[in-house]
Amino acid sequence: MSQTVTLHQIAHGRSGDKGNRLNVNVIAYEARHWDVLLEQVTEERVAALFAHRGATRVKRYELPRLNALNFVIDDALEGGVNASLSTDTHGKCLSFLVLGLEIRLPTETVPA
Amino acid sequence: MYRIGSGAGFSGDRADAAIAVVAEIAAAGEGGAIMFETLGERTLALGQIARGQDATRGYEPLLEDILTPILRPAHEAGITIVGNFGAANPPAAAAAIRALADRQGIAGLKIAIVTGDDLHGRMDIATAERWDGDGRLAEFSGEIVAVNAYIGARAIAEAIASGADVVVTGRVADPALALGPLVAHYGWDWNDLDRIAAGTLAGHLLECGAQVTGGYFADPGFKDVPRPAEIGFPIAEVETDGSFVITKPAGTGGLVSERTVKEQLLYEIHDPSAYLTPDVTLDISDVTVRQIGEDRVRVEGARGRAAPEKLKVTVSYHGDFFGEAEISYAGPNALNRARLAQQTIRERIALLGLDVRMRSDIFGTVSVFDADSGVMLSQFTGGPDGDYRVRFAFDGEDRKAVERAVADVNALYCCGPAGGGGVRQSVRPRVRTLSYLAPRALVTPSFFFLGEETA
């Protein structure tokens, strides 16, 4: 049996900006969910989240010692801190766009 | 063991944060350092503009507020103060600190000024290599306000080794504010790249202040943070081998956990095996974090490789004009009235022939995650009743055009949909930035002591 949860229920993260490039780290709360992150939080899925902003490239880095992924997303900020028309010119809120991804989990590993 | 704390993570941070950090380091009785990172891409450009208007300005506006409560206790405890609060005018910041010391009756304070980051007029931007993180951002032809290289920790370390009590810098790589004091204290060899990497990592974790001690972390019910109004800023206890413990002053709010450290460890990192600084290429691939006590996390495993050949340089330009205006709609059918307000302004901009770029959001729908195109809002299915605020943003080269666009939002009061209220509006000039790469030969960092200027 499996169940759908949001990534937010099994992972936390923070976003940062440099120029027009965004990075979002995604960190499993529990080591038992690390494999799920690797399998389901893919470059393709993250790229789809930022396609409407014109992101040109997504690169995923894996940090197994931290049970963490780091996504680097190019051209996601529509100009960046000094040129964007968005309210969140830094893209600081965008880690929570990623944390909204849906994840399939075996029912026995769903957090209480 | 050497203690280095953080007193600010950005320009505008809590001005009282450093007090507890200095008190904690002082209580241990072994001296140390406190760093202040107050300089963003935007703040430096604003500083350059301020200096252009008044030669005594252009440094961190909150400098006196930040240092007033800690200058004496830090000096008495042998705690070196290092900050990039010099911004666009480190000599003026140093003079202000001297004046503050005089008012407080502190004699003999040695204040060092680090130079070498300012490349204005010394670099040919037209032929320079672009930094790849700006992606598709177009070249910019506006008037240049400032050209500043990110410089490393050497001049800071040399200033402290020469007896500086306070080191004032402009643009330096943020982690250099910690690496400099560490190299001065331990005498690390600049070729000992793993230690230089470890000191850089300590600086990276400290540079955003409370972001490693429970700030920018709370997510109620998932990640709770005790007493967020009283978060203690971080202190790194660094060993001679470069390993360190991140902690915070006793009795403060916030927390230091493996989770808080991991989030900050990867903050603004791109390739974790190659975090580029002027002093070293830092590899955090094998870094481990381990909780060893309450609010104590041990960090080890940083590795270093040779620093990059070229240095990052940020160029600031007089940019365009940026206008914002907002209006609220609430109650029955509010979302449809908000959408009509958006449509009306779009038509007005076209009708008036205003040469501005425009974006419009409706707060309470999908405003933050949406793109300038508004594609997410067009697919939004919530509402229509509720409490919505329409926000318009405009930019353009012509101030008058931006002002007219903003004024037309204000005109929605009498001409727009029913029940619109609470208009707020502003127009301001914007500084634009692009980054480039400069050969090291162009950048020659150095320092001098205030009062000992040489020609």
Image (cartoon, rainbow, N blue to C red):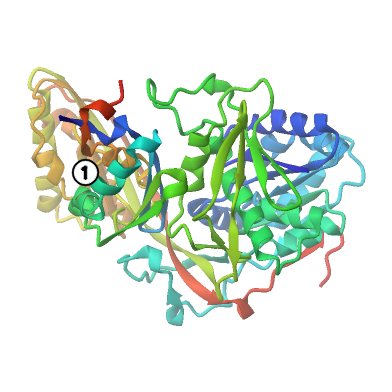
Q: Residue furthest bottom?
A: B127
Crowding around mark 1 (Cα neighbors within 10 Å: few <14, some 14 to 19, many 20+) is some
Residue at 48% over, 68% down? B144
Say whether residue B188 is left or right of residue A23.
right
Quadrant (top left/top right/bottom left/bottom right) for the N terminus of chain B: top right
| Residue B92, horizontal then vertical, whole percent | 72, 53
Query: Front-most of B164 and B401?
Result: B164
Q: Which residue is nearer to you in this view: B166 or B315? A: B166
Residue under label 1: B370
User: In the visual, does B413 lie left or right of B147?
Assistant: left
* Residue type, label 1: Asp
Residue B355: percent from the left, percent from the top?
21, 58
The secondary structure type at the circle numbered 1 is loop
Q: Is residue A60 visible?
A: yes
x, y percentage for residue B434?
42, 65
Position of residue A57 relative to residue B57, above or below, is below
